[in-house]
Image (cartoon, helix red, strand yellow):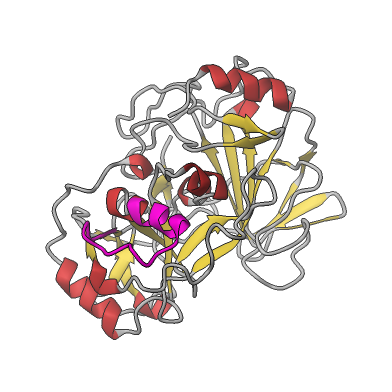
Amino acid sequence: MIGRGLMVLVGVVLGCSSTTDPAPLDGAPVGTSSLDGGSAADVPPAVSEGGLTTTARLFPEGSPWYRDVSAMPADVESPAMIMALALAGRFGSGELLVDFTFELNTADASAPLVPLVKGPDFSSPDCDELSVPLPPGGALRGESGYQCTMNGECHLLVLQPGAHRLFELWKASVSNGMVTAGCLAVWDLSRVYGPSGRGTDCASADSAGMPIAALLFTADEVAAGEIPHALRLSLPKDRIRPGVYLSPATHTTRAAAGSTTAVPLGARLRLRPDFPTDALTSGAKVVVRALQRYGMVLAEGGPKALTARGDRSTTARWAGLLGEHDLASIKPMDFVVVDGGARIPYGGDCVRNP
């Protein structure tokens, strides 16, 4: 972890003060948590690199994404879940591929607030209805700008360090001075969210109801030799168990069509500690160490297993560091599912936490 004093540097770079108290979310004071017994925590440290902001840990210590699971026992259903994944065709396309299409846009105090227009898939009370800070020159997932032109997921991720907030949107597109979205989830970055996150049976910009950006690994992390958090896992919907999820997920997709022994959303898979790495690139070895210590959490349906941030706003570049197929030698049988606690039946009605 980097010292908190560097957060002041970020405030200077972004043109905002790191000591300014933003307006609280849902009436909760910034720096405290009333959710599921979460404890007060400082905003996690960040460092400015080349005039841009890079965050190794967006949320405070104690958040589930930073839990070391290397010594946790296997889930009682782990053998059945791993076998179901292997028999169903392994990961999307069969290999543990990496998706580099996500972008994290950073909004300083000058970023304009763009009104939100609810798209046809917008669901209340799962999704928040707030204007979105939109920095110039940013991009959606898989796009070169803010317009969704290729009918993809078009996630829009915006970090607002001065307000300690993370805006995550699904099916987003910006035009005529407005942003249309299928969902907006606003995360309080000073808060340790409890087991039910933003609320029971509540989605976010991800099907599992979890934050996306907290689980994306970056070129800067890999270049530095450490990814200090869990990774985000996607699987085809026919390999996701329907009807239930595991905390820290708070939701499951209605499109899940896996077997009764398939992996549910929220499950965390840990790579075996003796996985051979001699043939791997140096960048792949960094990812392997993170998978052994923090694991990967099933968050969404999709064809590529692991998701990373693009490198348009990082100092390091993916070229020569890590490629899409560099982890292809890793198979489902190299993982165990760590103990995820009770299966939570999905009732379909979101109940937001205060």
Q: Is residue 274 a member of the stretch shown in magenta?
A: yes
* Image location (x, y in percent) of residue 220: 55, 44
Q: Is residue 203 a member of the stretch shown in magenta?
A: no
Of all residues, the one furthest to the right in this rendering is 176
Q: Is residue 201 visible?
A: no
* Image location (x, y in percent) of residue 22: 61, 22
Of all residues, the one furthest to the front in this rendering is 278
Image point (60%, 14%), residue name: 19
* Image location (x, y in percent) of residue 332: 29, 73
- Quarter of the picture containing the C terminus is top left
User: Is 220 on the left or on the right of 236, as rendered?
Assistant: right
* Image location (x, y in percent) of residue 183: 60, 55
Image point (68%, 61%), residue name: 119
Say which of 102 and 312 sits in front: 312
Image point (47%, 71%), residue name: 97
State the image quarter where residue 181 is shown. bottom right
The magenta stretch is: 270-289
Say which of 176 and 234 sits in front: 234
Q: Is residue 37 visible?
A: yes
- Quarter of the picture containing the N terminus is top left
> Relative to 241, is 214 above or below?
above
Count of number-bearing discs: 0
> Relative to 105, is 21 above or below?
above
Say which of 315 and 102 sits in front: 315
Image point (56%, 21%), residue name: 6
State the image quarter where residue 196 is shown. top left
User: Is 129 on the left or on the right of 345, as rendered?
Assistant: right
User: Is 151 on the left or on the right of 102, as rendered?
Assistant: right
State the image quarter where residue 48 is shown. top right
